[in-house]
Image: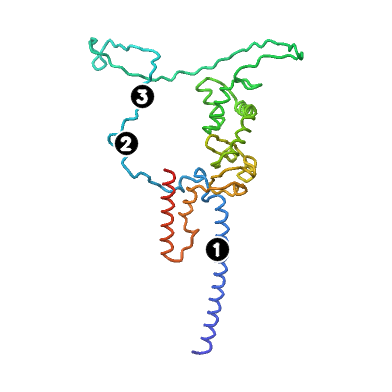
Amino acid sequence: MNEEKYKELLEENRLLKDKLGLFEQQLQTQAKRIDQLEAELRKYKNENTPTSAIPYYEKENLNHRHRKSGQKEGHRGASRTKPEKIDREEKLTIDASPCCDAPVKEMKAKPKERIITRLLNPKIENVKYIKPRYVCTCCGKEVQPEVPNAIPNARFDLSFAILISFLSVGMNIPFEKIKQLLKFVWGLDVSEATISNTLTKLGEFLGEDYEKLKSDIKKSAVRYNDETGWRILGKGNWFWAFIAEKTALYTVEKSRGKKVVRKILGKKANGVDVSDGLKSYDQLQSRKQKCWAHILRRFKREVYFPFKDKREKRDFRKLENSLKLGCCTTQT
């Protein structure tokens, strides 16, 4: 090999080494970027992410049906029973046959019956209460009778406030839809501001009862705590639920952080707190139990468990199956 050819090979080798070094730097940069993106993604999508926050196109197609649909043979039917009370009877007659328009003659056989449950149009009632003015013979103060079933300084009665609360909180219906429903069913025109003010006044009216619920929740032997996304006027908030055996406490907050837990439970709540593993509950000094569904959900992602060989992976799956079996046995 002549000297000129040798120099060309050396130069070519140097260029290849430079390219290789550049590629290694790019790989390191990309690996760091991937780690950053995965860490960022973990904030929004992890085993604690509510299913409602996962787009439907990212969810797996599941098939939980393992048996033939319908009830087993010999199973007693569970159709709707006939109502015990009949409010009115109506006899139906015809003068001509519906098939050929010929005259008809009533048979002497026992007539057939069919019971229909009708939904009657609800109505509203505007009541004017006359409140005589009285004077207390002891202190001389002017007193008046209280309006029954009404929140102080409200234009609607308590049943209206309870309905609005159920539709808004229980059914998660937006104010605009509630407004349309009231108009369609009752013919009642109300503004979204009226609906909002009614909920505020109801909260103030039930303030003492709400504080009692908080006290009962703190004293509960076991609490099931969870939170999910909740939009108010298009802005993201969090709907918190604290459930005990005989008590349920709900609150809507802007945060998903530990301040909400401290606000509701404090730091020295008694009993056991069952949660999905959200770190906001770690500050509690109570005993803790993680939700089985979230624990088992982590088993699906092998990225958390780097296996050395097939044996480790097989043993891991055996552990997963035994935990699932124990969980189902406990629940039943």
Task: Name the secondary structure under disc 1.
Answer: helix
Label placed on residue 81: 3
In this view, the residue farthest toward the right is: 140
- Give the amino acid type for the residue marked by disc 3 in the picture: Thr
- x%, y% of residue 50? 52, 45
The residue wearing badge 1 is: 31
Q: Earlier in the sequence, mark 1 or mark 3?
A: 1
Q: Earlier in the sequence, mark 2 or mark 3?
A: 2
The residue wearing badge 2 is: 71
- x%, y% of residue 104? 24, 11
- Give the amino acid type for the residue marked by disc 2 in the picture: Gln
For the residues labelled 2 and 3, say whether their Cβ atoms are less than 8 Å apart: no
Q: CA distance from mark 1 to mark 3?
A: 66 Å
Q: Earlier in the sequence, mark 1 or mark 2?
A: 1
In the image, 327 versus 180, the foreground residue is 327
For the residues labelled 1 and 2, say whether their Cβ atoms are less than 8 Å apart: no
Q: Quadrant of residue 240?
A: top right
Q: CA distance from mark 1 to mark 2?
A: 55 Å
